[in-house]
Amino acid sequence: MSEAILEIENLTVDFDGFRALNQLTFSMEPGELRVIIGPNGAGKTTFLDVITGKTQPTTGQVHFKGRNTRRLAEHQIARLGIGRKFQTPRVYLNLTPRENLELSCNTNKNVLSTLFSRPPGSDRQRLNHLLEITGLFLKGDIQAALLSHGEKQRLEIGMLVAQSPDLLLVDEPVAGLTDEETEQTGNLLLSLAESHSIIVIEHDMEFVRQIARKVTVLHQGSVLCEGSIEAVQNDPRVIEVYLGESEADDHE
Ligand SMILES: Nc1ncnc2c1ncn2[C@@H]1O[C@H](COP(=O)(O)OP(=O)(O)OP(=O)(O)O)[C@@H](O)[C@H]1O
């Protein structure tokens, strides 16, 4: 078995006395596409926040590619090879998808030099490849403002990939998307999974079924169970946790 790309031991995060993560232990192999689910407040976002260095754990360790990230700042962790996609797309709306991707490929360049110089051949090939895998090749030269919400989401995933991270963290990528856009985003993540390790947080179970190989269920800041989507959905502990949540919703 190869060395884990991400190894997390006994992670605890306390916010003013509230325990958001509780002795959480998690491990992931290189090349895995792991989906994390869990009811509201289970700690999913906090989990990503600790991996990226945005939140410091109260206790516990995160090792990325064998390196303890404890004393590293957010930008240093990003540079080690962790890229994060937030829920809302953050693309430059007045630039084209191609220009957005080019800026991300070369973070040393600024907007003006990107707009006024032609990229060398190898970069052009890479940009074309990114436009192809995100399904934006035919829209590569229109203003990004004209893209649909789903296309903007895929563009932002492409921008993340342009920075060549080893591990992609993707938070609720299909919230607010149509069924067709959801499927396209799923296909994009599946094709990226051939060459990246990916963690996806998602509530949409249809989408989870489309992409998931292994699912981790979080509950009250700890791992409740892990396994295939079928195993997890039939696990009585998971059923109980989700039933409890929908009963609470009914009483709101
Ligand atoms: N900065 C903070 N200060 C205090 N409590 C916080 C803070 N951040 C998160 N929490 C609490 O920690 C718990 C876990 O939050 P988190 O956002 O990680 O859950 P989640 O699983 O991502 O939930 P959701 O699915 O609703 O996004 C929640 O009860 C939340 O209110």
Image (cartoon, rainbow, N blue to C red):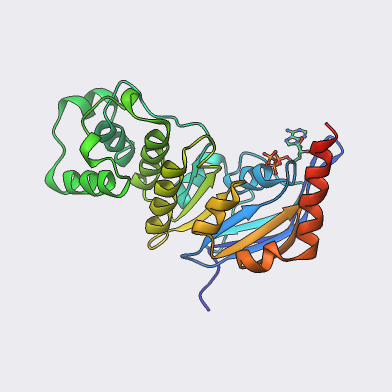
Ligand 1 location (quadrant) = top right
Q: Is residue 251 left or right of residue 94?
A: right
Q: In this orientation, which residue lies closer to the viewer: 55 or 215?
A: 215
Residue 186 x/y as whole percent:
44, 51
Q: Residue at x 38, y 30 (%)?
A: 148
Quadrant position of residue 116: top left
Residue 90 x/y as whole percent:
44, 29
Q: Quadrant of the C terminus?
A: top right
Residue 132 x/y as whole percent:
25, 47
Quadrant position of residue 238: bottom right
Q: Is residue 124 left or right of residue 10?
A: left
Farthest top residue in view: 94
Q: Is residue 69 left or right of residue 235?
A: left
How many callouts does the rendering have? 0
Farthest bottom residue in view: 1
Q: Is residue 210 left or right of residue 108?
A: right
Q: Residue at x 61, y 64 (%)?
A: 229
Q: Residue at x 70, y 50 (%)?
A: 38
* Position of 56 relative to 217 (above/below): above
Q: In this orientation, which residue lies closer to the viewer: 93 or 112?
A: 93
Q: Residue at x 42, y 42 (%)?
A: 181
* Position of 41 relative to 192 (above/below): above
Residue 28 x/y as whole percent:
57, 64
Q: In this orientation, which residue lies closer to the viewer: 223 or 163?
A: 223
